[in-house]
Image (tube, rainbow, N blue to C red):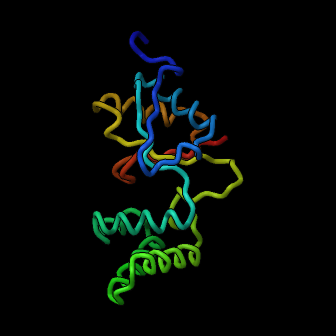
């Protein structure tokens, strides 16, 4: 493995929507091991575990920046119902805060974990995060990353593009 970084050399950066404080030591170590084994020196975590309120805001912002149909393509049937609340709120000319509150109410009604894998309980058994595909440079590096993620024993769940816009990892602690 000439030229591959050691686990200690792998650099993880965090996007504005990622809370570094929600990353467990085990998850950080696992991600660094995956990157080291895949000969990747740096990755960017763009999303981490969130509350139902955070999820309502994330979905609201994504609908505003992309559109409702895009968001419906990401979250499945229950997520579609949350997007429908957004669309209904717009028709009723509700404020942004009232729209987010209505979306939050729908998320809680349907069950937060039925909306997004990022809404997790506080039991600490799983650490959830997304890695930005553009932070892994080159098609071959992306293939190596995916191979190493799938091979790592601590990875409980993994979604990759095009099923998810990011590399979504759930790590057992």
In the displayed structure, 94 sits above or below 1; it is: below
Residue 121 shown left or right of residue 34 in the figure: right
Q: Residue at x 28, y 64 (%)?
A: 66
Q: In the depicted view, which residue is nearer to us: 119 or 99?
A: 99
- Looking at the rendered image, the quarter that the N terminus falls into is top left
In the displayed structure, 92 sits above or below 104; it is: below
In the displayed structure, 120 sits above or below 124; it is: below
Q: Quadrant of residue 110?
A: bottom right
Q: Position of residue 20 (x, y in %)?
A: 53, 43
Q: Position of residue 76 (x, y in %)?
A: 43, 67
Q: Residue at x 63, y 35 (%)?
A: 26
Q: Position of residue 67 (x, y in %)?
A: 28, 69
Residue 62 shown left or right of residue 77 in the figure: left
Q: Report the residue that reaches farthest toward the bottom.
A: 92
Q: Residue at x 60, y 34 (%)?
A: 153
Q: Position of residue 74 (x, y in %)?
A: 39, 62
């Amino acid at each position: 493995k000439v030229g591959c970084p050691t686990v200690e050399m792998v650099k993880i950066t965090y996007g504005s929507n990622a809370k570094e404080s929600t990353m467990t030591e085990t998850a950080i170590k696992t991600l660094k091991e995956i990157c080291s084994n895949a000969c990747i020196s740096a990755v960017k975590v763009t999303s981490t575990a969130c509350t139902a309120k955070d999820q309502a805001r994330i979905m609201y912002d994504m609908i505003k920046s992309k559109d409702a149909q895009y968001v419906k393509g990401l979250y499945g049937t229950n997520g579609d119902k949350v997007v429908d609340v957004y669309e209904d709120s717009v028709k009723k000319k509700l404020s942004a805060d009232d729209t987010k509150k209505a979306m939050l109410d729908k998320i809680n009604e349907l069950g937060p974990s039925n909306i997004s894998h990022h809404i997790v309980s506080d039991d600490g058994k799983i650490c959830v995060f997304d890695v930005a595909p553009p932070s892994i440079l080159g098609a071959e590096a992306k293939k190596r990353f995916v191979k190493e993620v799938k091979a790592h024993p601590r990875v409980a769940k993994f979604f990759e593009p095009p099923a998810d816009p990011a590399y979504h990892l759930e790590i057992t602690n």
